[in-house]
Image: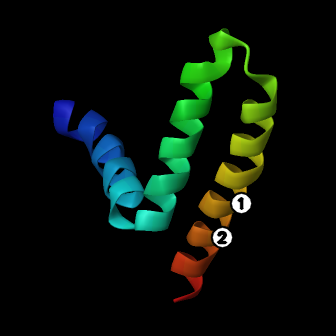
Amino acid sequence: MLPRLLRPLRALYQFLVGDPLILSGVVLLFVLLLLLPVGLAPLHAVLLVVALPVILAASLWRELH
């Protein structure tokens, strides 16, 4: 039962850590979530505009190659 539960988590970990672009996008999103309570709205917008396209482009690049 436990291996069945851990398999998706391991696959997600390998997906996120396997590509530096995806990892950098995830780190940017994590920083965005950490700064959310601080109230830095302009920084949130910049991080969101940068992080999401990085993750999406890296995912698409990875699927196509």
**Does 47 sit above or below residue 5?**
below
Rendered-image quadrant of the N terminus: top left
**Residue situated in front as seen by the camera: 5 or 10:** 10
Residue annotated with mark 1:
53
Q: What type is the residue that disc 2 sits on? A: Ala
Q: How is the image coloured?
A: rainbow
Secondary structure at badge 2 equals helix
Q: Quadrant of residue 29?
A: top right
Q: Residue furthest top?
A: 37
Q: Position of residue 36 (x, y in %)?
A: 66, 18
Tell me the crowding category of disc 2: few under 14, some 14 to 19, or many 20 or more residues within 10 angstroms, Cα based: some
Residue at 49% across, 65% down: 21
* Left-right relation of 62 to 57: left
Q: Position of residue 50 (x, y in %)?
A: 70, 53
Residue at 40% across, 67% down: 19
**Does 20 sit above or below residue 2?**
below
Look at the numbered discs 1 and 2 and tell me whether their residues touch, using CB distance below 8 Å. yes
Tell me the crowding category of disc 1: few under 14, some 14 to 19, or many 20 or more residues within 10 angstroms, Cα based: few
* Left-right relation of 45 to 19: right
Residue at 65% across, 51% down: 51
Secondary structure at badge 1 equals helix
Q: Position of residue 64 (x, y in %)?
A: 59, 86
Q: What type is the residue that disc 1 sits on? A: Pro
Residue at 28% across, 47% down: 10
- Does any portion of residue 1 appear in the rendered image? no
**Does 37 sit above or below residue 44?**
above
Residue annotated with mark 2:
57
Q: CA distance from mark 1 to mark 2?
A: 6 Å
Q: Quadrant of residue 58?
A: bottom right
